[in-house]
Image (cartoon, rainbow, N blue to C red):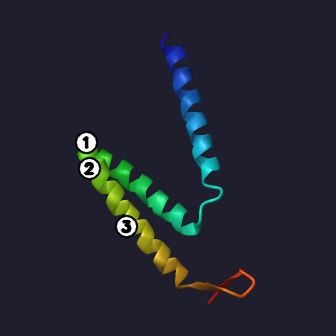
């Protein structure tokens, strides 16, 4: 019975991963960087503290870190009049 449960858990996690990866296709660079920061921060906060409050604080700090990283990256390029990214 445990093997059946493990198969269901593996299938569910594979499905969730594919849906999450496909959902990011239309996101902007800022959205992806902030979302990644939130995810990494939430997991790290949960691992360090072991409770939901730590995960929430980690998500907030990770989102802020992702936004700051995005602002730093955007200083290195601009867009021309055709919408193409030009690196400085």
Labels 2 and 1 touching (C-beta < 8 A): yes
Q: In which quarter of the image is residue 83?
A: bottom right
Disc 3 from disc 1: Cα separation: 21 Å
25 horizontally vs 75: left or right: right
Residue 66 in the image, given as x and y percentages of width and height:
44, 66
Residue in the image at 55% along x and 22% along y: 8
Residue 57 in the image, given as x and y percentages of width and height:
28, 55
Residue in the image at 57% along x and 68% along y: 29
Instruction: Examine the rendered structure and indicate whether residue 71 appears above or below residue 17.
Output: below
For label 1, count other residues whose C-alpha is less than 10 Å away and answer few (under 14), some (14-19) or many (20+): few
The residue pinned by badge 2 equals: 54
Which quadrant does the C terminus fall into? bottom right
For label 3, count other residues whose C-alpha is less than 10 Å away and answer few (under 14), some (14-19) or many (20+): some
Q: Which mark is residue 51?
A: 1
Return the disc, 3 or 1, that comes first in the chain's sequence.
1
Residue 61 in the image, given as x and y percentages of width and height:
33, 62
Disc 3 from disc 2: Cα separation: 15 Å
Disc 2 from disc 1: Cα separation: 6 Å
Q: Is mark 2 on a helix, strand or loop?
A: helix
The residue pinned by badge 3 equals: 64
Residue projecting furthest to the bottom: 88
Residue projecting furthest to the right: 82
Q: In which quarter of the image is residue 76?
A: bottom right
Instruction: Examine the rendered structure and indicate whether residue 67 appears above or below residue 13.
Output: below
50 horizontally vs 17: left or right: left
Instruction: Examine the rendered structure and indicate whether residue 20 appears above or below residue 82.
Output: above
């Amino acid at each position: 019975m445990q093997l059946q449960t493990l198969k269901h858990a593996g299938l569910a996690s594979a499905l969730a991963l594919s849906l999450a990866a496909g959902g990011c296709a239309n996101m902007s660079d800022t959205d992806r960087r902030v979302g990644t920061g939130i995810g990494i921060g939430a997991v790290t906060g949960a691992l360090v503290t072991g409770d939901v409050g730590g995960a929430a604080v980690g998500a907030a700090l990770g989102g802020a870190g992702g936004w700051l990283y995005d602002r730093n990256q955007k200083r290195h390029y601009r867009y021309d009049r055709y919408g193409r990214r030009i690196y400085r």
